[in-house]
Image (cartoon, rainbow, N blue to C red):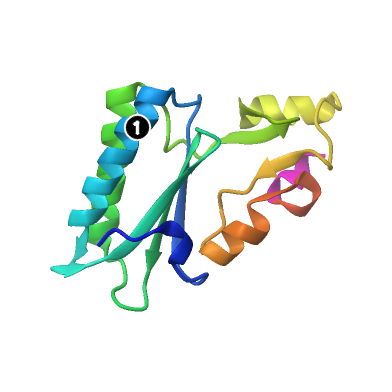
Amino acid sequence: MLVDFNILPDASRVWIYQANRSFNIEERTEIEHGLDAFIEEWTAHGSDLKAGYEIKYNRFIVLALDQTLTSASGCSIDASVHFIQHLEKKYNIELLDKMNVSYKQGEYVAYKTLTDFKKMAKQKAVSKNTIVFNNLVTNKGEYHEHWEIPASESWHGRFM
């Protein structure tokens, strides 16, 4: 059951998929329609899942699930991953590679391999104050409070 992302409780589970490039307008519109259709049909053991999403910075798909009614099952999580894999193939983008880092350079969102990010930290091209995206947050409350944070407050800080 598709609901507005903003009305989901802060305890809702989140999955964040970062793209290796920005979505163009046409892609974003198609991805939104695809997410709408996927979530409308998303179930766990035959029960509807109350979920929503948002797309941030034309680069991040944030999927949220209110687990107070029905929790995600292994099969429902697999279904969401298959949907994301479908998007990767259709738009020739990376969404599942967790070994990459996204961070802000002013208002621009940059995307680097972890190896390149470590090199940049050594060269002082990024600092402990660089705003990074902590895609390891697990619920909507953490997403709002701890997703966009200085590198010093994230796992990224160990490279500074």
* Residue at x 20%, y 62% (from the top left corner): 43
- In x, y percent, where is residue 27? 36, 26
* Residue at x 49%, y 72% (from the top left corner): 11
Which quarter of the picture shows residue 8? bottom left
Q: Closest to the observer: 83 or 56?
A: 56
In terms of secondary structure, where does tag 1 sit?
helix
Kind of residue at badge 1: Thr
Q: Quadrant of the C terminus?
A: top right
Image position of 152 (left or right of 148): right
Image position of 8 (left or right of 149): left
Image position of 39 (left or right of 92): left
- The segment highlighted magenta reads 155-160
- In x, y percent, where is residue 77? 30, 56
- In x, y percent, where is residue 24? 43, 22
Is 12 one of the magenta-colored residues?
A: no
- In x, y percent, where is residue 116? 67, 24
Q: Residue furthest bottom?
A: 68
Number of residue marks: 1
Which residue matches tag 1?
A: 29
* Residue at x 37%, y 56% (from the top left corner): 52
Above or below, 118 relative to 83:
above
